[in-house]
Every structure is written in structure tokens, then in C-alpha cells.
Image (cartoon, grey):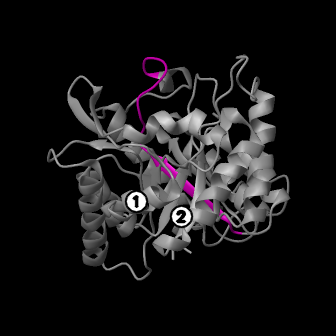
């Protein structure tokens, strides 16, 4: 049994083939897709966060709106770049979104990813502290966010407040109990996955990771997950961690599917560089008739290791087609692989 969610990048462009032409289209269709996905039995609605791009960049209004219009589906991100964030403001936003959804927020954060602009976080007013680089700044801010989610007071109250204060030090409000256990770290390397486990965060692993052994992507990712689980065990955390992997998976069940994604059938892992010094491996897409798709996915070691699978969706093709994509996986693929 696995939880199956979708992951949307929320692209929009004024392109004749797109059903998502504007930012408004992207936001409103994201809400509609989450509602429809809940109705067909999808477990999670997750959204990628990119700044300075025609994509979803401000997650909390969207997550809150989805939380208000749904009842069961998990709502999350994959991932928020902490280099751009004010951790205290984010504690307030996340707490509000989680309370609106009644405890369904699953928040993926990370130290960052390749950007649209050079050092975009500088435009948001952030600079690394002395001795930091931008990566360590992202981790520091991530840990501050986790610390402040604990609910412990730390701010000295004013002797002349506008409203009466409770006794003791104050914390950001609204506070949502249990949210700290639903924070995930997006890890692109084995070492980062171990670090996430040591700090009691769930693990998100995408379709890209550092190429650390030359093995196929799914094998390297499975090894990363096993290292995470072992580090979690050694750290002595009391709860069971969660692990998600994302995949582009398309069951070709009609002519439209074949037209859109038939060319993906022969795709293999790709090697590239996410910066001038970091060699990365990009996982393949899966697209085939259901019987073949089941055979291919049964060999994916990382999916077997994870408890949550996030299906990347082509959001620009509109809500109806994406519901079809998700329904096809639930109907033709998931039962045969024991995911349902």
C-alpha cells in the first residue's frame, strides 16, 4: 500500500496549445485539480515552488485555498527554497494553512535548487552570514523554521501590549500542533538524506540526484533512501519516517495519451550538471501501455523503498486531462503493483 499524490509545477504561458495561459489560470486550476483528485482517491496534492518564473511561487495562499475546499487529501510542497524565506513569517503562514486544512499540510523544504536568476534570494533581502555560503544559509534557515515550529515561547513580551499576553515568553501564532512532524527535506545527495534523518525530517527525493556511483538512477535513489532510514534508526527518533519519490508516469490507454506521451516510451536516465561542479543523474520517464508499464515499474527499486509516490502532472494540459492521467494510474497500474 502506498500513498499516491500528484506534483504540479504550475506552469503557465500564453501558448495556443496550453489550457493554462495566465497565473490566475494556474492557481484556480490547481485548486480544481486538487478537489477532483480527492474525489477519485488520490492521496496528496503537492506543488513545486520556483521564484522569478511563470510557475507557482507563493505556496501558502494556494495551500490554504485547497485546504478550505477539500476534506481528506494531503496538501504539500516539493520544495520550498529556504534561502528565500523568513523562517518566522513562514511559521505563521504554515500554521495558518495547516489549521485551515485541519492538519493535512505536508511541507517539503530544502536549501534550494537551480534558479531562474543569479542569487535570486538577494532580491528578497537575504545574505549569507559570515562564514556561510548560500547552501549553509538555506540549511540554517530550515533549522530555525523547525525550531520555531516546536511551539515554545522565545520572544520577550512588551510591558505595555496592545492586548493582554499569556504568561511567559511568546511564540508566533497561529500555532498548529503536530506540524513539526510533517516537514520534509528535499535531498539531492546521500549525505543530505542522512542529515535530514538526523534532524527528524521526512525525506523527499525527486527525479534528480547527484550521480554518486554511476549506477542507474532508481538504484542510486534506493540506496539514498536506505541510508536515510538507517540514519533515522541510529538517531533514535520515536516515530516512523516517511519517504516520497516523484516520477513522470503515463499509462497509454487512448490515442490522446499516445499523441502526448508515446515518445517518452524509449526515454532513459540522463546525465547532466546542476552546476559547474556537480554531476547529476536525471531519472527516466515511464510511458507505456498498462501491461508494460506495470513490468517496468516493478523493477524500480526506489519506488519499492518509498511509502509515497508523487506523480508529476502536465498541468498545462488542463484539469480534465490530468484527472484522466491520474485515474489511469489508479485504475490500471496501482492495483497490479500492490500500491492499492
Label 2 vs 1, first from the N-terminus: 1
Residue 149 position, x and y percent, is 57, 62
Foreground residue, 204 or 102? 204
Q: Secondary structure at mark 2?
A: helix
Q: Is residue 118 left or right of residue 251?
A: left
Q: Are marks 2 and 1 in contact (CB under 8 Å)?
A: yes
Picture coordinates of residue 234 (x, y %)? 24, 76
Image side of residue 63 versus residue 264, left or right: right
Q: CA distance from mark 2 to mark 1?
A: 9 Å
Q: Residue sitting at 77 percent across and 58 percent down?
A: 67
Q: Is residue 94 left or right of residue 307?
A: right
Residue at 76%, 43% (x, y): give it: 319
The residue segment tinted magenta is: 103-119
As drawn, 99 above or below 48: below
Residue at 45% from the left image edge and 25% from the top image edge: 115
The image quadrant where one finds the C terminus is: bottom right
Residue 196's label in the rendered image is none
Judging by the rendered image, the residue that carries numbered circle 1 is 297
- Residue marked by disc 2: 333
Residue nearest the observer in this picture, 230 or 293: 293
Dominant secondary-structure state across the stretch colored magenta: loop
Residue 320 can be seen, yes or no = yes
Amino acid at each position: 500500500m502506498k500513498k499516491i499524490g500528484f506534483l504540479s509545477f504550475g506552469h503557465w504561458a500564453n501558448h495556443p496549445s496550453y489550457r493554462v495561459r495566465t497565473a490566475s489560470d494556474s492557481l484556480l486550476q490547481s485548486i480544481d485539480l486538487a478537489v477532483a483528485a480527492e474525489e477519485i482517491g488520490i492521496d496528496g496534492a503537492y506543488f513545486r515552488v520556483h521564484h522569478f518564473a511563470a510557475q507557482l511561487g507563493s505556496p501558502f495562499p494556494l495551500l490554504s485555498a485547497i485546504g478550505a475546499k477539500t476534506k481528506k487529501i494531503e496538501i504539500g510542497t516539493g520544495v520550498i527554497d529556504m534561502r528565500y524565506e523568513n523562517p518566522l513569517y513562514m511559521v505563521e503562514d504554515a500554521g495558518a494553512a495547516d489549521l485551515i486544512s485541519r492538519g493535512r499540510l505536508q511541507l517539503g523544504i530544502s536549501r534550494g535548487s537551480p534558479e531562474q536568476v543569479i542569487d535570486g534570494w538577494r532580491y528578497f533581502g537575504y545574505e549569507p552570514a559570515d562564514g556561510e555560503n548560500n547552501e549553509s544559509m538555506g540549511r540554517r534557515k530550515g533549522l530555525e523554521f523547525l525550531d520555531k515550529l516546536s511551539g515554545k515561547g522565545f520572544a520577550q513580551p512588551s510591558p505595555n501590549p496592545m492586548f493582554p499576553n499569556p504568561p511567559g515568553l511568546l511564540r508566533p501564532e497561529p500555532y498548529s500542533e503536530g506540524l513539526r512532524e510533517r516537514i520534509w527535506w528535499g535531498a539531492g545527495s546521500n549525505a543530505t538524506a542522512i542529515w535530514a534523518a538526523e534532524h527528524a525530517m521526512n525525506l523527499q527525493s525527486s527525479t534528480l540526484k547527484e550521480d554518486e556511483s554511476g549506477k542507474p538512477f532508481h538504484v542510486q535513489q534506493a540506496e539514498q533512501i536506505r541510508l536515510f532510514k538507517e540514519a533515522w534508526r541510529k538517531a533514535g527518533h520515536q516515530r516512523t519516517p516517511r519517504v516520497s519519490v516523484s516520477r513522470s508516469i503515463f499509462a497509454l490507454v487512448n490515442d490522446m495519451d499516445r499523441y502526448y506521451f508515446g515518445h517518452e516510451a524509449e526515454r532513459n536516465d540522463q546525465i547532466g550538471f546542476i552546476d559547474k561542479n556537480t554531476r547529476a543523474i536525471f531519472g527516466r520517464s515511464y510511458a507505456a501501455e498498462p501491461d508494460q508499464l506495470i513490468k517496468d515499474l516493478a523493477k524500480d527499486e526506489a519506488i519499492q523503498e518509498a511509502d509515497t509516490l508523487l506523480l508529476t502532472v502536465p498541468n498545462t494540459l488542463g484539469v480534465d486531462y490530468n484527472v484522466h492521467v491520474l485515474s489511469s494510474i489508479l485504475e490500471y497500474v496501482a492495483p497490479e503493483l500492490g500500491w492499492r
